[in-house]
Image (cartoon, rainbow, N blue to C red):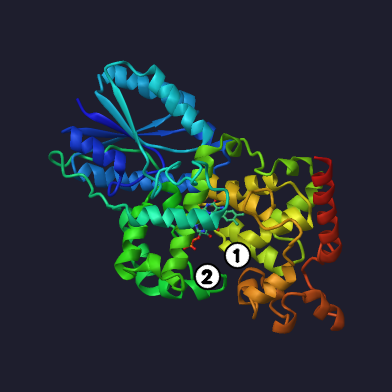
Amino acid sequence: VPAVVWLRQDLRLTDNTALHAACQAHRNVTLVFTATPQQWEQHAMSASQQALILCQLRALNIAAAALGITLHIQSCSTYTDAADWLAQWCRQHKTPAVYANNQYGLNEQRRDLRFAAILPDTCRFYTFDDSVLLPPGGVSTQQGGIYKVFTPFRRAFLNILMQTTVRVLPAPKAQGAPVTPADTGLTAQEHPLFPSGEDTALQRLADFCQRDAADYREQRDFPALSGTSQLSAYLATGIISVRQCLSTLRLNFPMVADEPESGGYTWLSELIWREFYIHQLALNPDLSRHRPMQRWTESIIWSPDSDALTAWQQGKTGFPIVDAAMRQLNETGWMHNRLRMITASFLVKDLLIDWRRGEHYFMSRLVDGEFAANNGGWQWAASTGHDSVPYFRIFNPVTQGKRFDPDGSFIRRWLPELAAVPVKYIHTPHEWADKNQYALNYPHPMVDHSMARIRAIEAYETARHTA
Ligand code: FAD
């Protein structure tokens, strides 16, 4: 009887810890994926990420069948249903063991606890830390606590990483003659930016490490350039692993951890940010409950203005860099990191809207939506995290635009209504339009940034003193 590998955010055959372990111990394995549309909706998973998952399952189904491995896709509604259904399936099929890779959100942890509790005694449940380079809890302070600040976390992380052998595990060997791929009935459309397939993702990783990683440090902040890897949706769904990222990086930069000035090191740091937030999520269940790390920020009185929220969501704030970024998000499901920081800061500080509303909107649109990174990024921008931008240091959206899109080429790509505006005024188009009596089909800035800045600082200070 085959063992079961319960797939989740690890939709790949190569370097899949649970799958590899199952194949070491059993002659036959079956892959099982439980789709949980109601749970995904509760978690605000975007339609584009759902489609990427389905496309990848379609690809996996074919790749696994060639190895004689079947993939069973079951639609359940919630995690509870998924755990119940799989336990029942294991009982029925007398499954000897289930292998799965850990997920670290609270609901995911609860699902696995429930599953372990209702599984028949004859079936073992093995779980693995797979989506991380080091297991959560494995990087602790000298007092045994968790690091709350990134830089010392990175230092400790790198120390341990240097003493750890990071191995990329092979795909399973064929377990028999190829089988005919089951008809999955999946009809999802491929995402233009993130086509499915492990090979596609690995090729992008190899190209980035060979070609772009060396300049990553200089280029990564400029959204008009394609200076970043655009691997996020592959990492979020597990089409590639973080170990594959590290090992490909090391192939090109063998001494990467010792070269803090290099592009490779800067990119490695981003992978460690990813790890930092996942560790925080795993060890602090309050994050899954959307509670701020800095408790005093719960007393901030947020603006209930839903028209302002809509203007931000639709990219109609009158601040070109913010609007171009939001349109990139709405149209492609991806947004450049610098722009995530600028738009998040704008929503929270300029509009004084609760960061959780932005966190939710991002999740509902991002193809790479990932709870830990998204929550971490929002808490950073909202100054509610432990290692966040200080609440009194507030991004000026015009200055940010001038700095990171100096000639406005990113803005022009997304805001064709500003085509006539000269470079000098691309960040303040109404200044030019007023001077030239030009009727711009583009909103005026919805807030006065310097007043909004004062309002935000006051709201934070009031909360700090009352909490
Ligand atoms: P690269 O610059 O090439 O980085 C490589 C990988 O490192 C990324 O694919 C990602 O997995 C990881 N990474 C990079 N930066 C960060 C970071 N700051 N925090 C955590 N991981 C990072 N990233 C997500 O994957 N999913 C999200 O839902 C998400 N939401 C965010 C929300 C906000 C408000 C902010 C400020 C950042 C968010 N990020 C999120 C982090 C970051 O913006 C994206 O990972 C990055 O833009 C993805 O593009 P890339 O693959 O080209 O990244």
| Mark 1 Cα-neighbour bin, 10 Å: few <14, some 14–19, many ≥20 | some
Q: Position of residue 130 (x, y in %)?
A: 36, 44
Residue at numbered disc 2: 220
Q: Amino acid at mark 1?
A: Arg
- Residue 247 appears in view: yes
- At which x and y percent is residue 58? 34, 45
Residue occupied by mark 1? 338
Residue ID at (36%, 58%): 245
Give the answer, above or below, for where 65 lies relative to 324.
above
Q: Quadrant of residue 253?
A: bottom left
Name the amino acid type tagged 2.
Answer: Arg
- Front residue (pair 196, 115): 115
Q: Are marks 1 and 2 in contact (CB under 8 Å)?
A: yes
Q: Is residue 48 visible?
A: no
In the image, residue 366 above or below residue 36: below
**Residue 399 picture quarter:** bottom right
Most foreground residue, 374 or 258: 258
Looking at the figure, which quarter contains the N terminus?
Answer: top left
Q: Residue at x 68, y 77 (%)?
A: 419
Helix, strand or loop at mark 1 = helix
Left or right of 436, for residue 290:
left
Task: Decide which of tag 1 and tag 2 comes sooner along the chain.
Answer: 2
Measured as percent of width and height from the top left, residue 266 is found at 47, 67
Left or right: 312, with 260 as reference point: right
Quadrant for the C terminus in the image: top right
> In the current view of this chain or complex, which residue is farthest to the left?
177
Q: Position of residue 317 (x, y in %)?
A: 76, 61
The answer to whether 118 is drawn above or below residue 444 in the figure is: above
Name the side, left or right, on which 110 lies relative to 67.
Answer: right
- Crowding at label 2, few (<14), some or many (≥20) Cα neighbours within 10 Å? many
Residue at the (15%, 39%) spot, across then down: 175
Label 2 within 8 A of ligand 1 by Cβ: yes
